[in-house]
Structure formats: structure tokens, C-alpha cells
Image: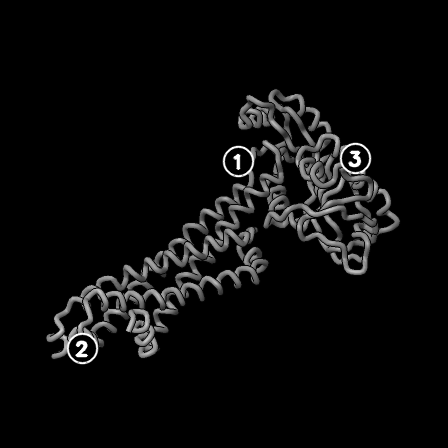
Amino acid sequence: MSTIQLALRNIAGSAFRSWIVLLCMLMVAGLYLSTTMILGGAQASLELALERLGADIIVVPEGAESKVETALLMGDPTQVWMPADKLKEISRVQGVAAISPQLYLSTLTGASCCSASEMFLVAYDPDSDFTLRPWLERHLPGGLDLGEAIGGNFVFVPPDEQNIKVYGYFLTLKGNLEPTGTNLDQTMFFTLQTAKDIARLSATQAEQSLVLPPDSASAALVRVAPGNDPNQVAMRILSQVPGVMPITSPQLFQTFRLQIAGLVRGMLAVLTITSVLCLVMIGLVFSMAANERRREIGVLRALGATPSYIFGSLLAEAGLLAAGGAVSGLTLAALGVYLFRDYIIRSLGMPFLFPSAPVLVGLGAGGLALGLVGVGLAVLLPALKISRQDPAAAMRD
């Protein structure tokens, strides 16, 4: 009888203990994968959001920092304004190489003149833009014309419609940006000219007019000239342009970064405690099982089974149970995070990007390997002890 066959027979003959080991490994593996996916996905979302922003510094009206950060990351509609004169002052600051204004708008709530309720809208200046331009140059060489828009990954034209309606204005969706895992995936982008056209026609086509303060912007994206430190340029903007607050890219989304750091500490503590308790439980279960099988193992030794054969069968039993529990836990965790990702985002108050298939497979393989190693260490001492016992003494017990 091979060690695998003996291990399978022992598993079938000790169903209760086997289920305990399986459930322990299911819990540890599932908690590991869900923790890794959520924390890693949240960090990936922040990095992609910064990459999509594509600016060294973002300048917002003083006091509007948290509103703009939440809007850019979570897609929460907001309306903040600063005079266009501020843009000219910022452009004259030493170290500023390029500046591009953006308007932050939103659709109406529950209005028939808007295809989607409270959708975050971003209007940009195509002449000075350097954030959307790389995507447009790859996919839409001609850029966006009047009445055209591009959307995040989850923006789509309603069924049986040919356009997206915003304030009664029909926008043509020309494409979708790559997913970021943030609510920017549900944001729509169009030019400042289109925004002004929507505002002009909304007075007669919408339930409520879109009002754009003249010569205003919600934020200014700044690219720093080569050889300049963004932090120093930001300090110059702060001291030379009153009424605005510059935020460098590393400082952007600090609230969310601190929230992620807190989650990392909390979830790692829970994962560590759960893993230790489960591995101790598995070790105790195998110690009890080994003691109960003393006679059986003594008979096997008397019939010629070597200590290595006994030791291998116990490790094989542990490995099969660990693999079964880990695979089940990993599968359930991946499925649960995928199905409830929107609920998780709302509960945590931060976005996360679901990993790609290769990354998910890699995480699963890592979880399986850690589970096998952990269980192997947990049963190592009981397996060594029982495999080295004297056959005659074991049969007398």
C-alpha cells in the first residue's frame, strides 16, 4: 500500500478530525487571499489613479482638498471653483512647465434629462491637456470633437439608445479608458467647449440648468519643468498664489493611504492570530490522531513498514487535507471578493482593483504553498514521534 493510499484511508476513517483540518485551512487560505486582494487592490487603485492623473502637482481652491481627492478617487460628484486668473498666476511660478485646467461637474439626481444619476463629469482643455492626451493619441488620434466624450471602464450607452444624455444634451461615447478599480471607471470626460455647450442648451433641455461660473476652473493640473523639485515648486505656488492649495502627487490621497495603512495593520493582525490558532489546532488534532493509531502503526511496523513510510503517510495525510482546504478557501475567497467587490468598496470607503488572472493565480499558488508549509510544520513533531516509536511498545499500549 502506498503512502497516498494509506493517507486516504486514514482520512476516510477519521472524518471528524479531517473536517476540522479542512475547515482550519479553508479559513486561513481564504483570509490570506481576501486580505491580499483587498489591500493589494486598494494600493493598485491609488497608483493607477495617480498615473491616470498624470500631473506632478494638482492645484485646488483652498479648503477643497478633501473634496477633490474624494472626487478623483471615488468619483463622488463635487463642484468647486477658482478664478481663471489663478491659472495665469500659477503658470508664472518658477518651475511650472505646463498647466491645464479641469472642471468637475455631475449629472442631476433622478432626472429624466440625464442617463445616469449623479455621474461624475470632468471637462478638460484639449489645447493644454497632458493627462488624457496619451490615451487619445493611441485610440483617437483626432481627439474629441464637440458633443463627444470618453468614459471610464464602466461607462456605457443605455440599452436601445445611441447616445448618453446629460442635461438633455446627447453625448457620443467614443471609447472607454482602461480600468483603475476606482470610481473614475464610472466617470465621463469631455472638452471644455462641450461643457459650455451643455450649459448653454440645458436651460431649455434639462430639468435644471447647468451653471458654469465664467472664467473659472475646479482644479489645475501642473507639470513641473525638468530639474525642478515638485515639492519646492508647490511651496512657491503656495506662497505666491493666495487662495489655492497645491498638492504634489506623493501627497495626493493621503487620507486613503492612511486608511490603507490602518487596514494593513488590522487585517495582518487578524490573519496572524487566526493562522497561529489554526495551525496549533491542526498540530493537536494530528497528535491525538497519532496517539489513537499507536496500535495500528505498531502493527504496520511489525509487518515491515519503515519509519520513513509511517512518517511519509502522516505528512501525505496532512498535505492532502491542507491542499483540499486551501484550494476550497482560495476559491471561495476569490469568488466572494469578486461578487461583493462593490459592497466592499462602499464598506471600506475606498476602491480596489480586482487582480488580473495571472496575478490571481500567483496569489493562489503562494497561498497554497504557505498552507502546505504551515501544516507540514504543524504535524512535523507528532509525525516524527509516532514514526520512531518502538513497535512492541506501541502494540502493548
Q: Is residue 218 visible?
A: no
Report the coloring of the rendering. one colour
Count of marks placed on residues: 3
Residue type at the position of mark 3: Pro
Callout 2 environment at 10 Å: few (<14), some (14 to 19), or many (20+)?
A: some
The residue that appears at 23% across and 72% down in the rendered structure is 290
Please tell me whether mark 3 sits on a helix, a strand or a loop: loop
* SS of the residue under disc 2: helix
Q: Residue at x 36, y 56 (%)?
A: 272
Amino acid marked by disc 2: Val
**Where 351 falls versus 377 (above or below)?**
above
Looking at the figure, which quarter contains the N terminus?
bottom left
x, y percent for residue 153: 66, 50
Image location (x, y in percent) of residue 63: 61, 38
Query: Which quadrant would residue 89 be assigned to in this image?
Result: top right
Q: Are marks 3 and 2 in contact (CB under 8 Å)?
A: no
Q: Is residue 290 left or right of residue 365?
A: left
Q: Tell me which amino acid carries mark 1.
A: Pro
Which of marks 3 and 1 precedes in the sequence? 3
Tags 1 and 3 touching, CB below 8 Å: no
Residue identifier under label 2: 299
Q: Is residue 5 visible?
A: yes
Q: Name the residue tied to disc 3.
A: 214
* Discs 1/3, front: 1
Which residue carries the number 1 mark?
250
Q: Earlier in the sequence, mark 1 or mark 2?
A: 1
Q: Residues within 10 Å of mark 1 (few under 14, many from 20)?
A: few
Q: Quadrant of the C terminus?
A: bottom left
